[in-house]
Amino acid sequence: MKISNLKIVNTVTGNRINKAKAAFTTRRVDFSVCHSLQSNVIPKSGDLVLARVVEIGQQTRLQLATGRRAHLFPGDEIIVVYGNRYAPDQFEGTVPKNLALCHLVAAGGVAAQLHSKHSKMKTPTVIEPIGLLTDKQGMTLNLSQFALKKIKSSEHRPLTLAVAGTSMNSGKTTTVASLVKGFTACGMKVGAAKVTGTGSGGDVWLMVDSGAHQVLDFGDAGFPSTYLIPLKEVEDIVTLLTDHLTASGVDIIILEIADGLYQRETAHLLTSQILKDKVDGMLFAAGEAMGAKSGVEWMQQLEIPLFAVSGTLTMSPLAMQEVEFHTDVPILTKKSLSSPTIVKYLHEWFPVQEEETVFAERMLATA
């Protein structure tokens, strides 16, 4: 038998695992089940890998599961997850076909083979996979094993809003956090989730810091990234996360859909039945007026219930004037989203038919 077909297995001590820097993407993993390292295998998205830092590049620090950003040094052993990356402003990468040298394409802990990068980016930090983590039975540990379990969907889903945008860095997460602030200022429990994207702690922590009662992301559904996963699984992520947020007793749910309208998973999700079933209203984030106008027209053609435009364009009074001139959708700034008056605004936008619901009561009290 050729050596390339062999699965070389070495036991790994708990001390070695504990000393390694475990990335944000591994936060749900129970490392007590780790037993061995397996090499000469083909990795899959979600597989956990113990790797050694070879050369520091764009990522000088690693987001840990604890929330701390740990400095990286050549020779450090880290635990990250194989996954795909789609980021026009940063990197494009996919899961490699072997355990050869690869790249840390996301500081949240995603390992991939680099395909392209934005010119402003340095080459990603280079890592050397030591082996995939396995359990006592020799089965490779994958994030999917530690995902939230499916639960029965509630018949009484809270009002659910979603935020999409023209591209990454258009202000989507800031918009979500601002909405969380506005609703919590009214005494409401807010559930927030990022349903697509690449594993990173920054967006999750911003939602937590803004006051959300519970925050989830696709990592809690067992995915290091949603890029290139089956489109049905993207829909399943939305269902799983909204079901768990509903079960947590929140009054309102706010979802972030990553990247832009042209991105594969985003485009599918916004045209899927799941959006109609799970989302009551959409807010569109854009960086400039033309993108806002195109996005508004795109959503209106799909009959998506769009209630406002926001995003980084609201930093510019002139950009807002352009949007106001070319669209008929209201613009909401970060300040207005963070204010309790957001409830009054939505009370006027949404017909309140079930006054016994918590959200309706809050809206009516504020209005």
Image (cartoon, helix red, strand yellow):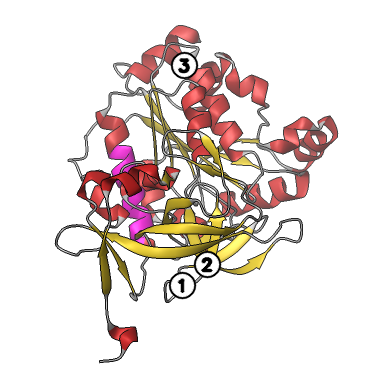
Asked if the residues shown at circle 3 and circle 2 are in contact, with their CB atoms under 8 angstroms apart, the answer is no
Image position, residue 218 (x, y; %)? 39, 47
Q: Quadrant of the N terminus?
A: bottom left
| 345 to the left or right of 147 | right
Q: Which residue is mark 2?
A: 102
- Secondary structure, mark 3, is helix
- Secondary structure, mark 1, is loop
Tell which tag, 2 or 1, sits nearer the viewer: 2
Q: Which mark is residue 184?
A: 3
Residues in magenta?
232-243
Question: Quadrant of residue 65 in the image?
Answer: top left
* Crowding at mark 3 (Cα within 10 Å: few <14, some 14-19, many 20+): many
Distance in Å between CA atoms under marks 3 and 2: 43 Å
Judged by its main secondary structure, the magenta piece is helix
Circle 3: residue type: Thr
Asked if the residues shown at circle 2 and circle 1 are in contact, with their CB atoms under 8 angstroms apart, the answer is yes
Tell which tag, 3 or 2, sits nearer the viewer: 2
Image position, residue 58 (x, y; %)? 66, 53
The residue drawn where x is 20% and y is 49% is 33
Tell which tag, 1 or 3, sits nearer the viewer: 1
Image position, residue 206 (x, y; %)? 53, 30
Q: Which residue is mark 1?
A: 96
